[in-house]
Amino acid sequence: MNDEQRRDFAEFVAARSDSLIRLAYVLTGDQHAAEDLLQAALTKTVSHWPRIRDSPEAYVRRVMYHEQVGRWRSPRWGRERTTDTPPDQAVGDRTADADTRLTLQRALRALPPRKRAVLVLRYYEDLPESEVAKIMNCSVGTVRSQTHHAIARLRELIGEPVTLEAWR
């Protein structure tokens, strides 16, 4: 990777890391696991940077989703991995509306991983159904039905109408 590509990658990470860490947090449900997930995704992304630098965010999201699915399936999931350097910047504290977030977080954890992921990608990341289908390697119809069933289950778990704006 040349100096220009390194600079482009550093700019991408600086500009998009807040959004990506939020996605990682929703996928993992744990701040430390989210940081690990994002670091792993960026590590995998940097080696493909020359090829994907025109549209890297979709690639990073896909890597994060697949990495997390692999962690759910792996018997070693939850083990820590060491890194050479600590993160460059801390993630801001987002404690406003804590009760709503905690209620929604508990309900999301009760969902199966695939339904949780489709809600995160669809509503939290505000991706169109077609992009969610690409990331999850399924049809648009599957995304629609998974979304419908996941929202219905969230409503049952919470006992009230779900406002997905509480995630933001």
Image (cartoon, grey):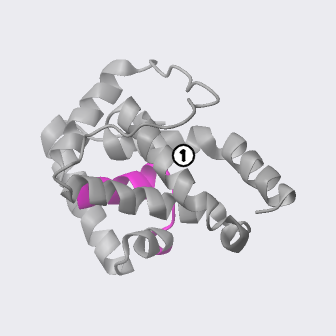
Q: Position of residue 5 (x, y in %)?
A: 79, 60
- Magenta stretch bounds: 113-130
Judge the density around disc 1: few (<14), some (14-19), many (≥20) Cα neighbours within 10 Å: many
The quadrant in which residue 3 appears is bottom right
Secondary structure mostly taken by the magenta-highlighted segment of the chain:
helix
State the residue position of label 1.
20
Q: Amino acid at mark 1?
A: Leu
Q: Is residue 6 above or below residue 58?
A: above
The single residue placed furthest to the front in the displayed view is 84
Magenta span includes 123: yes
Front-lying residue, 12 or 102? 12
Q: Position of residue 125 (x, y in %)?
A: 50, 52
Locate residue 62 relative to residue 109 in the image: left or right. right
Instruction: Say which residue appears at 23% left-offset and 47% top-offset.
Output: 77
Asked if residue 115 can be seen in this view, the reply is no
Locate residue 21 relative to residue 17 in the image: left or right. left
Q: Position of residue 115 (x, y in %)?
A: 25, 58
Locate residue 151 relative to residue 49 in the image: left or right. left
Q: Is residue 118 above or below residue 88?
A: below
Q: Position of residue 161 (x, y in %)?
A: 26, 40
Magenta span includes 147: no
Locate residue 167 relative to residue 11 in the image: left or right. left
Asked if residue 5 can be seen in this view, the reply is yes
Front-lying residue, 79 or 156? 79
Front-lying residue, 82 or 116? 82
Instruction: Say which residue appears at 37% left-offset and 77% top-offset.
Output: 137
Q: Quadrant of the N terminus?
A: bottom right
Instruction: Say which residue appears at 21% left-offset and 46% top-offset.
Output: 154
Callout 1: SS: helix
